Structures are given as structure tokens and as C-alpha cells.
Amino acid sequence: MSSACCRSWIGSGAPCWFACPDNITFDPAGRLWVATDGANDFDLPDSVYGVDTEGRARGLPKLLFTCPHDAEATGPCFTPDGTTLSFRSSIPPRIPKRSTRHSRCGPI
């Protein structure tokens, strides 16, 4: 899936945005679960959302989890009994800046 945005609502009823769906899964009740990757490009945290596929809330994303800054949510899946959702919050490695000075090791 590409960089797409859709409206989402948090429990308070305040609107928020859902961008860059990347991984999906379904629970035994048929709800869609979406993990995002790339929402940081829109100044939003990557997150995990649940979306009802039937009833009055059909198609309305609900925020479940927000990743730390620069992290993405990956691999959502349910246990066989459907009671537990697992996913990973993947943080890219930080590459330290190289020092222009060399340090000496051992006795001087």
C-alpha cells in the first residue's frame, strides 16, 4: 500500500490522521488491523489501528498504539485463539557521527 491518508477518531471524538498503511491482519471477528510505516513523513507517529468491517463503526479506524518517534509498527498478528494481538515497534539504528580525532588505546 502506498502513502494514503484517511480520517481516524480517538476515544475522545477528536479527529486525527492515519497515513501510510503498511501491514494488515484480521482478527477472528473480522476486524481489520493496520500497522503504518512512513507516517513520520507527514509529521505523524507510526501506529496500529483497528477498523471494524461491519456495523455502525464500519471503516472507522481506531488508534490502538502509537510508536516512539522514528519507529514503525510491523508484523501485526493474532494468537490462534484470537485473544492477543502481537506486533513489533521497529526503531531504525542510530549511526553515530564519526569522530575526526583518533583515540589511542593502551599505555602511552
Image (cartoon, helix red, strand yellow):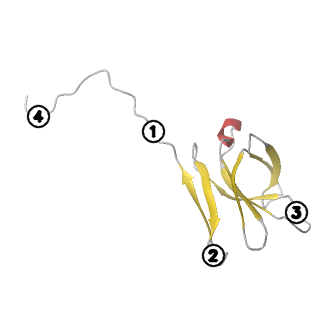
User: Residue 103: image x %, image y %?
Assistant: 21, 27
Check contact, mark 4 vs mark 3: CB within 8 A: no
Q: Earlier in the sequence, mark 4 or mark 3?
A: 3
Identify residue for label 2.
80
Q: What is the C-alpha distance between the residues marked 1 and 3? A: 40 Å
| Residue that badge 3 annotates | 58
Q: For label 1, count other residues whose C-alpha is less than 10 Å away and answer few (under 14), some (14-19) or many (20+).
A: few
Amino acid type, mark 1: Arg
Amino acid type of disc 4? Gly
Indicate whether 6 appears above or below 81.
above
Task: Quadrant for the C terminus, please.
Answer: top left
Q: In whole angstroms, how far apart are the C-alphas of marks 4 and 2?
A: 56 Å
Q: Which residue was labeled with disc 4?
A: 106
Amino acid type at image mark 2: Pro
Alpha-carbon neighbours of circle 3 within 10 Å: few (<14), some, or many (≥20)?
few
Quadrant in which the N terminus appears: top right
- Disc 1 element: loop
Secondary structure beneath disc 4?
loop
Which residue was labeled with disc 1?
A: 94
Q: Contact, CB < 8 Å: mark 2 with mark 1?
A: no
Q: Nearer the viewer, residue 54 or 66?
A: 54
- Which residue occupies 72% across, 44% down? 20
Camera-side mark, 3 or 2: 2
Q: Is residue 41 above or below residue 75?
A: above
